[in-house]
Amino acid sequence: MKDRNNNPHPQRSIDRRNFMKWMAMGTASIASLSALSSCNSDKIESFFQEQFKELDETELAEVLDRLEREYKKEYDTVIEVNSTLPMDHVLYGYGLDLSKCIGCRRCVYACVSENNQSRNPEIHWIEVLEMEKDKGVDLLHSNLYYDHEQVPSDGHFYMPVQCQQCKNPPCVKVCPVEATWTEPDGIVVVDYDWCLGCRNCMSACPYGARSFNWSSPNIPVEEINTKTEYLGNRPRAKGVVEKCTFCIQRVRQGLYPACVEVCPVGSRKFGNLLDEQSEIRIIMKNKRVFILKEELNTQPKFYYFYGT
Amino acid sequence: MLFQKHSFLIWICLLLLGFSGCNLNTYADADHADPISKQVLNVLDSTGLIPAQEFYSDYFPCNDCHSEIPSNSSRRELVEMHEEILFDHDSENRWCLACHSESDRDSLVLAGGKHLGFDESYKLCGQCHGPKYRDWKLGIHGKRTGEWNGQKIYLLCVNCHDPHSPKIKKLEPMPPPRKPDQIKMDTIYERPEQ
């Protein structure tokens, strides 16, 4: 590399490189200014919006208001956008009874309608894997696309996989802009307005739990869940990553996640890991429990167990 | 002399420490030996556990008819009435009057003769299915809905299991996700830019 101190033209006040740099910046700023002047104030505000964690109370309220206005315009229906604080002394944990799950996929679609996932292209936060009883938990030979007339199919068991809400989440580590992080109650969330869409987190996640909006999400207006959370189920835009949040809009109100509510066989359990009397803690104490891909040290808060 | 006095004190301290350690261990052991019984009480004592709506058959109240029909306690296949009930619940050894009271058809009856209302049927199930009953009370078996930190709705055994044929029936699954090669880009709807 050329030594800067040996510049053969020290007398020049502006060299070619600097000239080009300033020209480029000038052109870019003029272009962006003209682009902004054609936008309305909401678009300008959304362009300059800070990352969620850096918003103070008034800024956050403004952002939520603006989002509601934008959704009203886009979907022609009133969509409520909230931002609920995490509860104190709560760390969410999830249990799934592999001996009960029958693979009916009710959870997959309850999740889609609760969390406003795109219908076409199709985004599912829960993937139900069919495995052979003879092979045990064998991800390599599992089948996501099983299509039987009736389930459970003989000789098979079913393992739903969704975000494991890791305590040591690789997806959070790789995000170049801190658009995803772990909330104090243990939920790994995404700021959809801060996400670049680089999909590093998707390749880092060993559970395939994150999905990308390759096109504008398409949700029939009458099917939109209008009670939404900023970090949860509010409608997303094209080019951002999304994931399961344990139904943050429900659990922070004290409700069970939608997948727990819908499961016809009661294989899904949910509760506060810091409360010894919670169902999830009782399960962890009394049943055979395992976590998926333990060897990766992701430390999931999603516990598979055998209730029998 | 001073040293001896100190060493005596140290011994006392060590002894005390040892005892306190023992105490901790016994607590842990006791907790470990019988983790369930304590928790059953706590879970059942906690507020707001409301049972889900009870399962009633179309026939209820049964006494409307049975009060007028003389009771026949001989074990037989039903032909005139209730023949649509498929009984597949240890049918070799049990039949109607193993659970339904002979003297009061609006009640169930425990093995010891105690009568129960249909809304307490889970106690009847629990007399054979002990470990499942225990797990259900703890929230491990069965389904609860409502609030994870407050009012929970309990589904009773009979909300999911038909008491006459308790094995869970197979279900039609919802459609599988689209395989990547089935996704056609031109079928994907793009919302026009605003």
Image (spheres, rainbow, N blue to C red):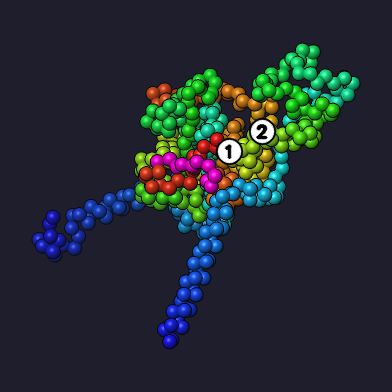
Please name the residue that numbered disc 1 is placed on.
Answer: A260
Residue beneath the point at 43% across and 86% down: B2
**Dot 2: chain letter:** B
Report the quarter where the C terminus of chain A lies: top right
Residue A148 in percent (x, y) is at 50, 20
**Dot 1: chain letter:** A
Residue beneath the point at 84% across and 28% down: B103
Residue beneath the point at 84% across and 29% down: B104
B127 over B187 or under it: above or below: below
Residue furthest top as drawn: B79
Residue furthest bottom as drawn: B1
Residue furthest right as drawn: B68
Residue A165 in percent (x, y) is at 47, 46
Residue B130 in percent (x, y) is at 64, 37
- Closer to the observer: label 2 or label 1? 2
Residue bounds of the magenta highlight: A284-293
Q: In the structure shown, which secondary structural element does the residue marked by tag 1 occupy?
A: helix
Front-most of residues B44 and A123: B44
Front-most of residues A194 and A299: A299
